[in-house]
Image (cartoon, rainbow, N blue to C red):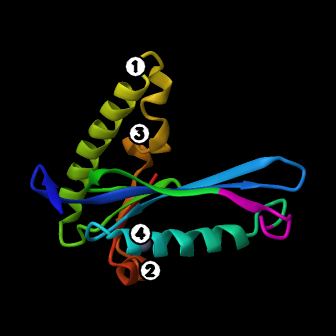
Amino acid sequence: MSDIDGVAAYPNYRFGLVVRFPDGETSNISEHRMFREAPDPDMLDRELEAWVDIGLRHERPSGAFLERGAVVEQQEATFLHDETWCQAWFSHTSLNVRLSDDDLRADFFRYISRETARGRKRFPDDPRMWTSGLMGAEEIWRWAGPCRCEHCVRREVVKIGH
Ligand SMILES: [Zn+2]
């Protein structure tokens, strides 16, 4: 575990799954995961396997991957960076539950600057892509939280929706 501007930063990974259907079509899903400690390779494998298993059974508009005869073409866990927030579906979560709401908001603001800088580095010629991974978090008026509901408390996270 490291820290960024005095806030604990945790290893973030991207879990990715590519499946192939009998007709040759492929589909992929991915999710970012934050770990309390750097996972050893065995732990990372176990977490990825469990995630892939859920992903294959997950019901989508056109049915679960498995029911449609999908086979796993590729699955991988890729280390992204140590960060204070982890990206999810129109929300971000942090493990820094002891920070005040004001400190969390200030840290989230700095996180967005760092994420935008990473986007700028990756896509220097395409400004629309600089904030594409943030799903609207760059617009402060969208922020809801930090949330400390029962569900967040059980997961030992705080969440900002956007
Ligand atoms: Zn919550």
> Is label 1 in contact with label 3 (beta carbons under 8 Å)?
no
Which one is nearer the viewer's eye here, 1 or 5? 1
- The quarter of the picture where residue 66 lies is bottom right
Residue 39: image tag: none
Q: Amino acid at mark 2?
A: His
Tell me where residue 106 appears, x and y as whole percent.
21, 50
Left or right position of 10 against 75: left
Label located before the other in sequence (4 or 1): 4
Q: Amino acid at mark 1?
A: Pro
Magenta part, dominant SS: loop
Cα–Cα span, label 2 and label 1? 39 Å
The residue singled out by tag 2 in the image is 151
Of badges 4 and 3, nearer the viewer stands 4
Of badges 4 and 1, nearer the viewer stands 4
Q: Is residue 67 magenta?
A: yes
Badge 4 element: helix
Residue lying farthest to the right in this orientation? 23
The residue singled out by tag 3 in the image is 139
Left or right position of 107 against 128: left
The residue singled out by tag 4 in the image is 44
The residue singled out by tag 1 in the image is 124
Ligand 1 closer than 8 Å to the CB at disc 2? yes
Residue sitting at x 33%, y 68%:
35
Which one is nearer the viewer's eye here, 51 or 133? 51
Of badges 3 and 2, nearer the viewer stands 2
User: Magenta part of the protein: which range?
Assistant: 64-73
